[in-house]
Image (spheres, rainbow, N blue to C red):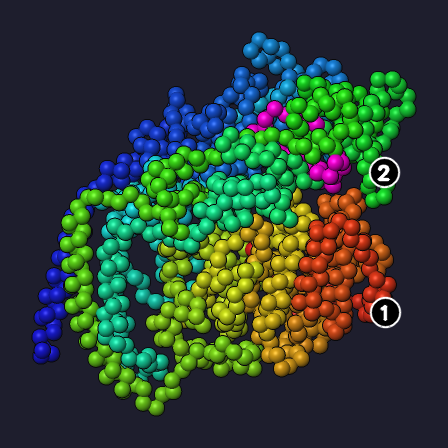
Amino acid sequence: MQPHVFPAMSWFITFVAMIFICGSTLVFANDDERYVNCSNSFDCGDIKGVGYPFWGSNRPDYCGYPELKLNCSDQDLEITIEKLTYKVLGIDNQSRNLSVARKDYAEYICPTLILNTTWIPNLLNYTSDDQNITIYYGCPTQGAPTSLFVPQFPCNINATEMTGYFTAFANLSVLGSSASSLTGYLATCKDSIKVPVRESAFQQILSTRTAAQLLEGLNEGFGLEWNASNSLCDTCQLSGGQCGYNQTTTAFTCYCKDQPQQFFCQQSPPEAQSPTNDQSPKPKICPPPNESCFTQPPSRYQHHPPVTSTTLLTFPTIPPAAAQPLLIPPPMHPLTSTSSLLTLFLSLHLATSLPSNGISNLTNCNQNFSCGNLTNINYPFTGGLRPSHCGPPEFGLTCQDESVTILKANSLSYRVTQLDQTSQTLRLSRSDLDDDSPCTSQFTNATLDDRIFSLGASHGLYLFYGCKKINDSVMGSDQPPKTSRFPCDNDGVTEEGFFSIVYPYGTEYSFLNTFECQTNIQVPILGTQAKQLLDNGSLVGEVLKEGFDVSYSNPYSVNCTECYKNHPDGYCGFDTQLGKPICICNDKLCPGKKTKERPLLIGLSTAGAVVIGIFFGCWVLFVVQRRKRKSAQVKSKGLPVATPPSSKGLTTSTNLSQATTSLTSSKSYLEKGSTYFGVPVFSYSELEEATNCFDPSKELGDGGFGTVYYGVLKDGRVVAVKRLYENNMRRAEQFMNEIEILARLRHKNLVILHGCTTRHSHELLLVYEYIPNGTVADHLHGRQSNSGLLAWPVRLSIAIETASALAYLHASDVIHRDVKTNNILLDNDFHVKVADFGLSRLFPNDVTHVSTAPQGTPGYVDPEYYQCYQLTNKSDVYSFGVVLIELISSLEAVDTNRHRHDINLSNMAVNKIQNHALNELVDPFLGFDKDIAVRRMVTSVAELAFRCLQQDREMRPAMQEVLEALKRIEKENYGAGNAEVLDIRDDDVGLLKHAPPPVQLSPDSSSDPFWADSSTITPHSY
């Protein structure tokens, strides 16, 4: 064929291709009724423009979640949830918050039906501005408290006069000596509920303590935030669709003009959407880098021409021969290139008709859970051979010693002694009260999620601990009966405790006038055991071990039934990221219902696209490759071929310029290829869109090197995107360093790097897996430190998993160099993911140390590294020793509010241990003074931390030795109850008595250039 024929033929083929593609698109272009209906907004009174995830009135039920139906009553917007009706005071689509107030408290503090305020798991949650008030109803007139902190109010409910009380204190122990008597009295009230109020109203109630102020605060309402597949809705709206909910598949649906899609519309650009309502915030079409989307000065970025909405593909103009050298890629085989273009054509054309089942590897849901006497347990329970995706997280079981089944709920562990899936009942007993004794170190009430679990025929047993006689003048009936007493050993000291069974038996609390008890808890017991216990108090340990009955209900049973109905061979499961039930077929998501509309047209248009794509692709590739070969012959003469930096060897300041030059030369290679060091390369625009133009509301953390953002990729993956502050040589080194290290490491306790941008994108961006549960620092002394979730077994597990990750790094010749609790992430099961490798270094195994300028975080840096500029793997050991002390004490590594000798936690710990005052260092929450097992383990871990904090690095153990020691501590104490209490050896104490103290960080240390340049503590690091 002659060359001059190509232009005419190309136009002909292009014309035919457009007819096929556009024609098949127009066939499906009829506006879908659901798209039109979900474009409507819900208006009521002063609240207008309400859209997804709500429905009602002119918005059909498929436009929102079934639980979020709105109603307009006398120009008041209302929503009914769990039998309670709330007045909607406002809806903020930007923050996805709604403000509501209970209607039953609109005029009177005594409602007809006394119901708790409950919410829908994973859909609606309280905001951080909400606080709970506890209200008691039907309290006895005798023995009424006189405390000003528990105000009284009268009630008339259904013509019945009664007395009520309310308190703003979640734990009455703050009231001091009167706490026990108040708790005992309030337990005799017939009903109690918790109602949320805003923080401002909470403070007013706390200060005035009147029923009128309480009623006013209740009517001011409280906040709720919704999570209804928010990221999917953002993607859908950006593509021109309307968000909705498929009642059949019980999953998010994107309604497009032609037909519903799973996630987004393909046919129309964003400008084509025409919603009439102002719904939840739509992702911004991010402007070019010279506009206001960026918070940094625009001069920092390379400027690229803006991409208009009409541009489909742009081919770069080949620069003249005098331009800068280019990396010449190897010749591309025409057939391979044609396949790539064909794949692109098919992807663009078929994306609207083929659902994307992004979740795969959903295996083993056909397996059963068996442990001890419990066998063949299946959905909704998970555990053992059944992975977590096989059921809701509330039903997770674990098997201990191959015989004991454990269910964890609200920071407590329960032994499951009976489980009947036919009657949906469980028999539970608290693990900490399972040794025939009522003594425990976990002073927490036995509470379960009442939306899933409900108590059977049981009674509440109150256990009072640490009781001392305070009044010898009270005689007679005020003395507690001997049968209700029990002794508890607290660190070798015997303390007295009492038990009391509440309604209907109602044992007297008058002994609390004679005795003062430090704390108390409430535990359910079987109804059949309550009377027996009153007759024989010595059976209290056996009664507690017997446990209590609980019935359970799966909130997703309807979804599961639908799954079995549509897919008889399928299995019910759960997506913990989306918080939604799923249906699993052949180890992946089951396909949706197949549409039967116009199959012939789909087949014809697909075949046409294939044929046209092949011819068009061959022609384009022939022309492009011919031009490239000619250009390459001219430009490659005398030019060296650049290669990416080696993945082996040490990247230090001595070879930075070479690495940077190599990376610069590799620009063409990176942008045309798909990986860098085996890591996928994302375009800057992809990550800009994933983070909604780096929306500040999506920030997860802010550190010394960059800001981390929450993002959702086009394939639905939830990720964390780290945006480095500057694009200079130093940042480029850290950028390349982290990619190079993470690309070659695989460990279950190391964060996964999903990808990165090229060195020549607008900014340096790294894409990690999203770890949802914050950092260890958050839970120890940060925003989640009051959650009570980090009991000692969890902390020990965190230490072991972190040590395992660091030992793996050292075995792989990598030094982390920034080990700290802010760089230890936690997933929802409190498993560890070590992150942030920007300062890490490859460590050749044939050298003793690497000389490099000290970097790291104050409080964690190895003193010998700081003083001698010599980095070894023992530097990580020192930092890990600080982490161990944090796990023991819940204190920050550096705190200028402490005494000047204790500003540095490592100094403080060494001094406490040397002076045999470890008890002054340990977090009281751990029960160090009350639980012998905890005391034994904490002491052993403190000894290990002491060794890690040695000044002389040769005296520190290797990380593998640290890991083995931690595992031994766990095994000896949880595997055998008769292990001896370990104490700090005298010779170990002597190691530090005459050694120079570790480097102290004083308030004036910021003048040191090293400290001033160090990374700062971050709430959420990667």
Which residues lie in the magenta part? 433-461
Give whichever of discs 1 and 2 has the lower sequence position. 2
Q: CA distance from mark 1 to mark 2?
A: 40 Å
In this rendered view, identify the residue nearer to me: 871 or 990: 990
**Secondary structure character of the magenta stretch overall:** loop
Q: Is residue 863 left or right of residue 658?
A: right
In this rendered view, identify the residue nearer to me: 322 or 133: 133
- Frontmost of labels 1 and 2 is 2
The part of the image, by quadrant, that contains residue 131 is top right
Amino acid type at image mark 2:
Thr
Residue at 80% x, 20% y: name it: 510
The quarter of the image holding the N terminus is: bottom left
Q: Is residue 780 left or right of residue 39?
A: right
Q: In the rendered image, which residue does mark 2 sit on?
A: 494
Q: Position of residue 972 (x, y in %)?
A: 73, 55
Q: Position of residue 369 (x, y in %)?
A: 53, 45
Q: In the rendered image, which residue does mark 1 sit on?
A: 994
Residue at 72% x, 57% y: name it: 969
Above-or-below relation of 960 to 701: below
Residue at 17% x, 46% y: name it: 598
